[in-house]
Image (spheres, rainbow, N blue to C red):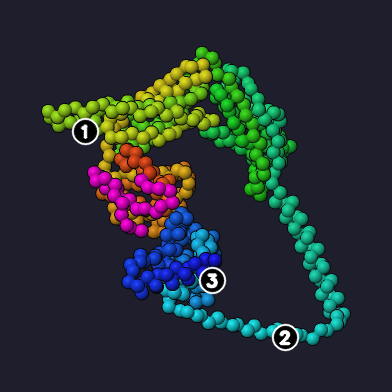
Amino acid sequence: MTTRDQVRRAVATDRGDAARGLATEPAPSLPERLLTARERKGVDLYRAERDTKIRARYLAALERGDYRELPGAVYTKGFLRNYALYLGLDPDDVLLQWRRERGDSKEAQAVIAVPRPLAAPRTGLTISPSLVVFALLTASVMVFAAYLGVQLLRFAKPPTIAVTQPASAVIDVDEDSSTYLFEGTTIPGGSITIKTADQELRTNAGSTGEWNLEVDLRRGENRFEISATDPSTGKVAEVPVQRLITVPFLVIEAPTLSVDQPSEGATFENGAIPVQGRTTNAASVVVSAAYTGPSEPPAVDAPSPPPLAPPAPVTVPVAEDGSFSVPFDLIAGRWAITVTASSPERKTSALTRNVTVAYKGVNLVVAVNGGRAWIKVWVDGKIDEKVGAAGLVVGDGKTLTFTGKESVEVRTGSSGVTSYTLNGTSLGALGKNGIPETWLFAPPTEPQKTQRR
């Protein structure tokens, strides 16, 4: 039995039940089916437009049941069939429900008669003096164009770049080395640029194309990117040359450590404290925190709150240039954040910053884990600008933060993969995978499920 036969039998059964006076649960309308299927798929109207090649305003009209916005019944049938296949629905079932809801039993099909093109009489090729002149003129223009193209190609060719010192892509130098002299060749008068993680040096080649430039070295790995520019054309070498020079650390040398953020005594209105800095000779950096008291002094004669358990330390990866950065989540209170850098020889350096976390209003962190999810957000009752009225598809592992004075409301196409952290407190996922839900966060009230779409 086909799907169409099953639908017809179900319709007949419902009519029979209605005739016998039996209560039947009303089936969802076609616009509701399309909207629910798209939200379950986790895509917005603009993504569906790109995938189906159907304009978003037509898809929105189908989901509203506003068929007057569509160009005609023939186009509507085609749109419904393609959209149903894209959403994983039975197209015959969708078309049958569309006809049933419109009250149409039959639909006339327009027949378009395409006129046949007129056949022109064939004529033979006639060679005339004017045709010969035209052919010679055309050939001359093509030869000149080819010559001009070759000259332009030669003029637009990017410069070459070669590094003769150091000749190898990776070298090690003595531990007391603080500078290195680069040497190489390029086009005569070419401009040479050497880039590092924190500086950019320039020099010009001589009349023979030879150049040299001295650069500073720091302990550890020093990465350099060498490129050349033709000053007359502005063309840059297609492939820059890479060099890696390593200056070994002294065994007795402890790591150096500087912390740019947070600053001492800083106050934050959310718990995602940015911890950033730079270190050298460090194999790892660990960030930890200790609770030192409430964010505001307690009332007179009020009992002191119990000390909070410290969060788990976080190990931060160190970049090649020695920089590190991580958001460190803390709840409300006063905290002492300690950053510790450890060398391969177990030498350590540590710095501490005292900060205060005092939440104001609503701070909601939305994280998507285990798949993609479409979300739509209202902050204090208004559509969030960075998400937009059509919503946003958030990829697996992505995190978004929303801040409001009174409330934040989130609709997700897959509640099971969407987790929430409200004012520093992790709430986790509030629903199941593939289920669209809307949740309202307005502390101190507990999160509530709403019907906003």
Q: Is residue 174 magenta?
A: no
Between residue 380 and residue 311, name the one nearer to us. 311
Q: Residue at x 64, y 34 (%)?
A: 242
In the image, residue 276 sits, relative to residue 403, either above or below, namely: above
Q: Is residue 414 left or right of residue 232?
A: left
Count of number-bearing discs: 3
The alpha-carbon separation of the residues under discs 1 and 2 comes to 90 Å
Quote the CA–CA distance across marks 2 and 3.
Answer: 32 Å
Q: Give the range drawn in magenta.
A: 430-453
Amino acid, disc 1: Glu
Identify the mark nearer the N-term, 1 or 2. 2
Nearest to viewer (mark 1 / mark 2): 2
Residue type pointed to by label 2:
Leu
The residue sitting at 49% across, 67% down in the picture is 6
In the image, is residue 132 above or below residue 43?
below
Q: Residue furthest top?
A: 252
Tell me which residue sits at (21%, 28%) in the image. 305
- Of residues 63 and 94, the one nearer the viewer is 94
Q: Quadrant of residue 399?
A: top left
Point out residue 364 in the picture as x, y percentages from the top left corner.
Answer: 34, 44
| Residue of label 2 | 118
Where residue 355 sits: x, y (%)? Answer: 31, 31
Look at the image and say whether residue 436 sits in the magenta stretch.
Answer: yes
Marks 2 and 3, the one that precedes in the sequence: 3
The residue wearing badge 1 is: 296
Choose between 282 and 309: the one closer to the eye: 309
Looking at the image, do the residues carrying marks 3 and 1 touch, with CB atoms under 8 Å apart? no
User: Which residue does the image show at 27% across and 39% down from the upper left?
Assistant: 359
> Mark 2: few, some, or many residues within 10 Å (few <14, many ≥20)?
few
Name the disc covering residue 78, or none.
3
Q: Is residue 76 above or below residue 296?
A: below
Is mark 2 in CB contact (under 8 Å) with mark 3? no
